[in-house]
Image (cartoon, grey):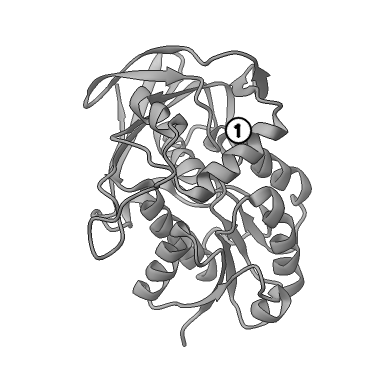
Amino acid sequence: MSRHIAVPGATGRTGRFVLAELRRRGLTPIPCDRTTDLDVALRRADAVINCAGPFAATAEPVIAAAVRAGIPYLDVTAEIEVVTDTFARHAGAAVPIVPAVAFYGGLGDLLATAALGGARGAEEIVVAYALSSWRPTAGTRATGAVSARRRGGRRVVYEGGRLDYRDGAAPRTTYEFTTGVRPVVGEFTMADSATIPTHVDVARIGTYMTSNAVDDLRADDPSGPVAVDASGRSAQTFHVEVVARTGGVARRATAAGRDIYAVTAPLVVEAAVRILAGEGAAAGVASAGARFDPADFLGALDPHALAFGPAETV
């Protein structure tokens, strides 16, 4: 019998990819929009994947509905403040809650956990993103604006074992990826800097994003991603490297693929499938990296969606 998964935000770009991935995996989606009565929809659901941003407005009501229905909640938020709020508010929830199971948040968290190789702490973790381009969706722009207002325009960094805020422009430098040296913007903090510390004892998380992607993100171009194949994926490519350093030893795990919005779908659907099968299904809030064996999880994904480079000492 097919499992039913409710998907708020089903009409957005990421939501459409999630619907397609659910069907590909033999699951039955229940598409939801902003007019849907969640309590009615979730009565028929075995889990809910929230794709409706800005998550500052949707996460709490959808979590509440999931708790009332007694079903797991997952989302794809990249909003750092929403992730921290979710962990703070729902540690004792009666159902599994997994925020940020997406390109930003879940992927970096899983890669960091893989790089640690079973260790529970690191002196430093570095997350570096190389994007060929970044034509953000309207949803990305809207959620970014919400987060910027919440921060008063300040930047977020993870230093001294906590998230902190800084004024001024982020530093520009270069980073040596395995694929070559690229110009990057430092202190480009994303949701993995909120998920990783929930289960890893780390003093500092350094973050880098290729400069071209940051410039694209800030450009006055509302056109968004352009589909280049029947699946709806864009031509954008990504390469992510995470390095964990402890006691003079550095270990690195990598991932690569195409379209940061499209790759979110196999990540969050894989997490939902595993939780429904009983793996990583503990009640309360916990990240993907805390719930699953990262190498097994990432290695199980279709390599056409995500190519995982297992951890190695560097």
> 10 Å neighbourhood of mark 1: few (<14), some, or many (≥20)?
many
Please tell me whether mark 1 sits on a helix, a strand or a loop: helix
Task: Looking at the picture, tell me which residue is in the foreground, 183 or 63.
Answer: 183
What residue is shown at x 38% (from left), y 46% (from top)? 260
What residue is shown at x 44% (from left), y 77% (from top)? 27
Q: Where residue 216 sits: x, y (%)?
A: 39, 32
Q: Where residue 217 sits: x, y (%)?
A: 44, 33
Left or right of 268? Residue 150 is right
What residue is shown at x 51% (from left), y 16% (from top)? 170
Residue under numbered circle 1: 197
Q: Quadrant of residue 151?
A: top right
Compared to residue 312, the image places residue 44 above or below, namely: below
Q: Where residue 87 sits: x, y (%)?
A: 70, 45
Question: Could one spot residue 185 in this view of the protein?
Answer: yes
Compared to residue 81, the image places residue 121 above or below, namely: above
Give the number of marks: 1
Q: Where residue 292 sits: x, y (%)?
A: 49, 52
Task: Looking at the picture, tell me which residue is in the foreground, 296 or 228.
Answer: 228
Question: Could one spot residue 128 in this view of the protein?
Answer: no
Q: Amino acid at mark 1?
A: Pro
Q: Residue furthest bottom?
A: 1
What residue is shown at x 59% (from left), y 22% (from top)? 157
Left or right of 133? Residue 164 is right
Compared to residue 314, the image places residue 105 above or below, namely: below
